[in-house]
Amino acid sequence: MNQKQQTSPFYNVDWITIIIYLCLVLIGWLNIYAAVYDADHSSIFDMSRNYGKQLIWILTSVIIITAILLIDSKFFNFSAYAFYGITLILLVAVLFVGKLVGGNRAWFEIGSFRLQPAEFAKVASSLALARFLGSNTLKLGDFSDQLKCFSLVFTPVLLILLQPDAGSAMVFMSFFLVLYREGLPPFYLVFGLISVILFVLSLLIPQSYIIITLLVIVGFLLWKDRRVRRHYTLIIGSAVLAITLVTAVNYTFNNVLKPHQRDRIDLLLGKKVDPKGIGYNVNQSKIAIGSGQLLGKGFLKGTQTKYDFVPEQSTDFIFCTVGEEWGFLGSLVVLGLYSVLLMRIIALAERQRSTFSRVYGYGVASIIFFHLFINIGMTIGIMPVIGIPLPFISYGGSSLWSFTILLFILIKLDTNRNGIIR
């Protein structure tokens, strides 16, 4: 390899990942066009429509990609904390001067241009966590080190919850997967699973029944097994934590959540049936996906899409356009692309010699996986509607830019995979 090739910004670039990215972005653009198609504005380049605006975001993303590939890999490690600090400042600022949209003060607005700092907080947190784990000799088995990592990850969460944007805040839970890969004890994953189970039970069963059951289980364990009895402090502490969680869930559900949020949860749990009210979006989405059958109705021929039966179809519910017009096979192709992308990202992360690059790679994979799972889960009715976009496909500049930056920083880091980034 000659010196000129090695100094090229495209030297050692992972083209497989880039091709998958381009395919997903193109699929997104075409489906945004289909979702908001108007015969009076039939040109896909009409800048007054969402698909025209999305083209602008795509073209500006190319500029962002070029800039990232031109930057030295070491820059991202060096400036990680600076990016993180700037993002925290933006998250505070948006609470005071942000535009109120859909009940959330989460956007900066300049003319017709909107920017959502919570989207970029995922990138900044990934970089900061990678920098922290890469530049310190940490033992994630030690509680003090765990606390430092949790503080780094969940400080943006608190600011995002003040907007309030629960959907964006939930995405940060994906960082537990990153920490687990780096040595976080399995206790936290087990605790998270138990917490989810208790959360659901708390909404289905009277609180008093759950508390009595927990007390009976603890009493039985302490009375029956001497080996377990030696760990009575842990058992009693866990019981107190579980009871506190049950109580907190009930209080939050009844006193903190808004009525429409409570209705959505009740609908998901089957406690309420309201296909023409709060469940309208999900019901119409499932009809659209199901109506596509095996091969779909064809491009621009989806009736659910064409007659606007599904609200927010170009953003949160874009996948139902894929299902209706491209059918089961088309949906399978899209999911296949995402699957290959995730496997590719993990492969890139694992081949890094630098801890910084590896941790960051797992951050990218975890965030994309979480978005994918929740978004598609919303459209088929197995997850609550919390309003997070489908990566690279949903309409929106902040979303496309943030996912582009997130992915291409990893691609740039991978070009220097044989080096140690400090």
Image (cartoon, grey):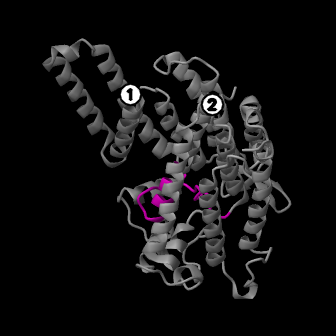
Q: Amino acid at mark 1?
A: Phe
Bin the neighbour count of mark 2 within 10 Å (Cα to Cα): few under 14, some 14-19, many 20 and up. Answer: many
Residue at image point 72% right, 32% down: 80
Residue 215 at what x, y percent from top left? 25, 27
Residue 187 lies left or right of residue 341; in this view the side is: left
Residue at image point 34% right, 42% down: 197
Q: Quote the CA–CA distance across marks 1 and 2.
A: 25 Å
Q: Earlier in the sequence, mark 1 or mark 2?
A: 1
Residue 328 lies left or right of residue 71; in this view the side is: left
- Residue annotated with mark 1: 187
Numbered mark located on residue 86 in the image = none
Residue 396 at what x, y percent from top left? 69, 61
The range drawn in magenta is 370-395
Q: Where is residue 267, by image quadrant?
A: bottom left
Nearest to the observer: residue 169 or residue 76: 76
- Residue annotated with mark 2: 356
Classify 391 as above or below 133.
below
Q: Secondary structure at mark 1?
A: helix
Residue at image point 73% right, 40% down: 91
